[in-house]
Image: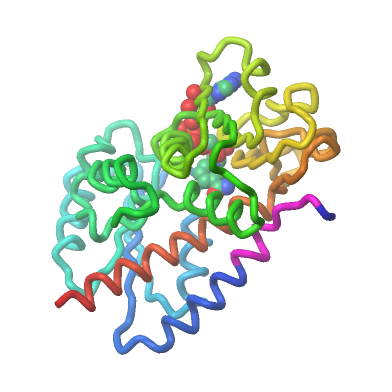
Amino acid sequence: MENILDGKKLAEQMKASLKDKIAKLPYSIRLAVVMVEGNSASQIYVDNKIKACKALGIECNLYTFSATTDENEVANILQNLAEDRKVHGILLQLPLPKHMNKDKLLKLIPAEKDVDGFSGENIGELCLKGLRGNAFIPCTPLGILELLRSNQIEISGKNVVVVGRSNIVGKPMAMLLLTEGATVTICHKLTKNLAQFTRQADILIVAVGKRNLIDADMVKEGVVIVDVGINRMEDGKICGDVHFESVQKKAKAITPVPGGVGPMTIAMLLYNTYQAAKQQEERV
Ligand code: NAD
């Protein structure tokens, strides 16, 4: 369909181009993935990331801990990986069990290996300079920006509403759009009368995790919709936060779920890992 923002297709193109570049490198790229069990979705996400790395020729080492592991054990492996010169990127899969201090563990990943872009240093650089800085930008916001740009969707001067304020999607997304010249409004679970804001959006980005949160009545004609949400339906299939069928009729462009933001997120993780390896290996 004409107004679909096809993340799957763009991600495939980006991965093919990255694969060619990686094949020409005189060194191998290595990503370490650290996962603590206890979240059923995490295993699926991690499997997908590992599969994608392998397909591109990126070596991937998985370190899995049981849900009751002591935090110090995870800290030890992160410290070792931080010092290991053969490891270019480190990914700590979130969420972690409640007894672990996420912020403390994330701080053990050096900014130059933080391919998820979650560290304070990378987020700070993103806020200051956006795409023009040296930051690793969180994969989902970076993927969304790439999807909009490759579909010639103007951002500068537009009213963009971001629903969701998490550190991994909503907040970095809003900062990135701001540095690209958008007028950004951030809504969240305490926002009163959400529709009053979403109806103003030229571009509406929804990252909440609630099926059918946004319906056709909440958007204006000609809006561009980016649906980040992943929700599992009764039949096991996944859907986003936006009521796709009704909203698509009003939208100028819309991302499907699946096949929109998800594949772009993975493509950007691979891109960030490639960049991390290049920076570390080609440093003079
Ligand atoms: P999160 O739970 O950390 O944040 C959810 C946000 O939604 C919060 O800021 C909260 O204030 C807001 N919120 C909750 N209820 C709301 C309401 N009724 N109205 C407005 N705002 C509300 O989640 P997250 O990690 O940011 O992820 C959000 C969704 O995106 C999830 O479904 C997640 O699975 C999905 N996700 C998808 C990808 C992808 O690659 N496609 C990547 C990351 C996250």
Is 19 located above or below residue 154 in the figure? below
Give whichever of 147, 83 is nearer the camera: 147
- Residue 178: x and y in percent read 45, 37
- Quarter in which the C terminus is drawn: bottom left
Which quarter of the figure has residue 34? Answer: bottom left
Relative placement, left or right, of 282 versus 186 is: left
Query: Colour scheme of this structure image?
Result: rainbow
Q: Which residue does the image show at 54% across and 42% down from the upper left? A: 156
Region in magenta: 3-11
Q: Is residue 10 magenta?
A: yes
In which quadrant of the rendered view does residue 245 lie? top right
Q: Position of residue 148 (x, y in %)?
A: 60, 51
Residue 64 in sight here: no
Residue 274 in the image, given as x and y percentages of width and height: 37, 71
Is any part of residue 107 visible from this angle? Answer: yes
Left/right of residue 99 with respect to residue 13 in the rendered view? left
Image: 43 above or below 96: below
Spot occupied by residue 187 in the image (x, y as percentages of width and height): 53, 23
Which residue shows up at 43% across the image and 66% down it? 271
Based on the picture, tell me whether residue 135 belongs to the magenta stretch.
Answer: no
Q: Residue at x 42, y 81 (%)?
A: 22
Q: In terms of image quadrants, where is residue 62? A: bottom left
Query: Quadrant location of the N terminus?
Result: bottom right
Extreme residue in the front direction = 157
Q: Is residue 214 left or right of residue 162?
A: right
